[in-house]
Image (spheres, coloured by chain):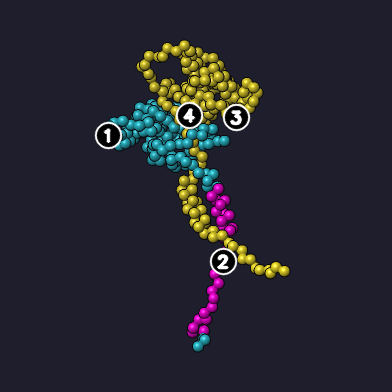
Amino acid sequence: MNSRFGKRRRGKTKVLDLDITSLLDILVILLVFLLKSYNASDLKLNLLEGIKLPNSKSRDLGSHAIIVQVDGDKNVFYNNRKIAQIDPGQETISELESELQLEIEKSSPKDGKRNEKDHQLNLVFDKSTNFKTMKIVMHTAAIAGYPKFKFIVQGEF
Amino acid sequence: MRRLTRKEIVKPNLIPILDSVFIFIFFLLMSAQFLEIYEIGSDAPMISSDEPQKDKKPPLNLSVEIRKRELILRKGIDNKVFKKIAKKDGKYNLEEFGIVLSDLKNQFPKEESIIIKPSSAVKYDSIVRIVDASRMRKSQLDSAGKQIEEKDLFGKVIFDTSN
């Protein structure tokens, strides 16, 4: 029987030849673009809203360390968590100091020797921040045991 | 007479290449940073109780005071002012600052440090520009009149937070 619902006719099925050349072109363009924006740095920074980084000619890649961010309203963020607001009259930020000291206690090895990287602190300031505010943060960090500062800036070439 | 035969065009198998390109793209997408972020390293100033080394040449001990209207450069153990650079068109004159530092670097090629002492009201943006100018100088002429692209000046920046 050769009805509509009956036996299907067996014929040679043609393999559909999909042209992927244009797709490959797009992928190569994407690859070049991504390779251009590839950064070997292990620093993962979630820049807070409202913080504008200053432009710099520095070419030193950032490295992983504790991140302290200060926005234009002098709010202090410790690893993206707001911990305090700087009052111009104060000399140190007690909240930041206790957080940093807690971090030292948590990360200090049994022999008590900390390597150089453990003393580093990534400082992210809004470009409108004045030196008085910067000084309070730097002073607090140095007291807490972090005398090496890494100022995070935006590349300008 | 030669017989004409139909030649079949050999198509390369692009699928394995496509697979590897896809994997590579995912890897790059994960590690891509669209904001170019760099760092400027600085140490907090420390007080040393060691006896100063007795060298024939006295240390440079270069420091820059950033004031609202000018840059004041000091040097030597007595911290004597040797240059004042006033603002030009409302901006710090970084060109002249670069020339002065370049001359100093020629006199003291082994010196790496510079102490930066900004006034309380100076903005971070201005400080970064001055730090850049004190670390590196771009586009200048050497003694033979040849263009030099870059010159390392004083790469070790220390902030004075004393007052």
Q: In terms of secondary structure, where does tag 4 sit?
A: loop
**Position of residue A11 measured from the top left corner of the image (x, y, whole percent):** 54, 78
- The local crowd at label 1, few if under 14, some if 14 to 19, many if 20 or more residues have their Cα within 10 Å, is few
Q: Distance between the residues labelled 1 and 4?
A: 40 Å
Does residue A8 belong to the magenta stretch?
yes
- For disc 2, the marked residue is A17
Is residue A99 in view? yes
Instruction: Compare marks 1 and 2 and give the one earlier in the sequence.
Output: 2
Label 3 resides on the chain identified as B
- Give above or below for A143 relative to B80: below
**Position of residue A94 measured from the top left corner of the image (x, y, whole percent):** 34, 31
Label 1 resides on the chain identified as A
**Position of residue A3 measured from the top left corner of the image (x, y, whole percent):** 51, 86
Q: Distance between the residues labelled 1 and 2?
A: 65 Å
Write down the colour of chain B: yellow
Q: Distance between the residues labelled 2 and 4?
A: 65 Å
Q: In terms of secondary structure, where does tag 1 sit?
A: loop
- For disc 3, the marked residue is B149
Does residue A57 belong to the magenta stretch?
no
Labels 2, 4: one chain: yes
Chain letter, colour cyan in render: A
Looking at the rendered image, the disc whose residue lies closer to the viewer, 2 or 4, is 2
- The local crowd at label 4, few if under 14, some if 14 to 19, many if 20 or more residues have their Cα within 10 Å, is many
**Position of residue A137 measured from the top left corner of the image (x, y, whole percent):** 41, 30
Along the line of sight, the residue nearer the viewer: A35 or B91: A35
Quarter residue A45 falls in: top left
Residue extent of the magenta highlight: A4-32
Q: Residue A130 — which label?
A: 4
Q: What residue type is labelled 2?
A: Asp
Looking at the rendered image, the disc whose residue lies closer to the viewer, 1 or 2, is 2
Q: Residue A110 — which label?
A: 1
Quarter residue B54 falls in: top left
